[in-house]
Image: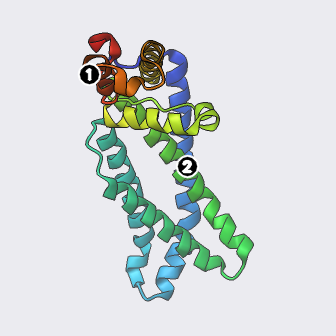
Amino acid sequence: MAAMQLTRTHRILIGVVVAGAVVIAGIGFAGSYAAVRALALQKGFGNFSLVFPIGIDMGICVLLALDLLLTWIRIPFPLLRQTAWLLTAATIAFNGAAAWPDPLGVGMHAVIPILFVVTVEAARHAVGRIADITADRHMEGVRITRWLLSPLPTFKLWRRMKLWELRSYEQAVGMEQDRLIYQARLQARYGRAWRRKAPVEALMPLRLARIGVPLAQTA
């Protein structure tokens, strides 16, 4: 599959998002530095308290950037992301400790990190999706309306897609329609006991359809 082409509008929006993420990260760092530094001083960090907040925030940025890069080149390493969120949670806790026991103050300290987390997660989702599409490995999902209207057959369809790497939802639905049509023809020809009366050669396409082989290739 060809690589996704970005239009001028896409590039502008990406620039706005990146600039906004940098601003959010900068505001979060500026807001948390003093609180974390003061807490580090109270805990006996001494002069190290000057760089301790910087180390945490830089660690978060480096880990998330590396996670995005590895996701883009399709060799993700989940520990990077998990460690980054652990450090983010630690930063929120450190900042919240400065406002404790005021719940409003604790909540205010958590707002900016949460915004940053959501922004990075959205970026990671987009990067992962684009990487899958570029590598022709993106697997489409099943529409929610189908799950609601026909749960059990939809589960079987979803299971077949996952088991046999059927990436196109439309292709999977088309194969299911072909299977049902072929099954209806067998039932019309051999009656209600068609599963016992139909010859093996006639049943074989249905069995192969269960493992993702299109009926057009076997019927």
Residue 56 point in image, percent of width and height: 41, 66
Q: Nearer the viewer, residue 42 or 218?
A: 218
Q: Earlier in the sequence, mark 2 or mark 1?
A: 2
Displayed quadrant of residue 176:
top left
Q: Gap in Å between the C-alphas at discs 2 and 1?
A: 55 Å
Q: In this figure, which residue is indicated by the disc labeled 1?
A: 200
Dot 2 lies on which element?
A: helix
Q: Residue at x 32, y 58 (%)?
A: 79
Is residue 200 visible in the rendered image? The answer is yes
Dot 1 lies on which element?
A: helix
Relative to 95, say whether 178 is above or below: above
* Label 2–label 1 contact, CB within 8 A: no
Say which quadrant the N terminus sits in. Answer: top left
Relative to 84, say whether 206 is above or below: above
Q: Amino acid at mark 2?
A: Val
Relative to 38, say whether 189 is above or below: above
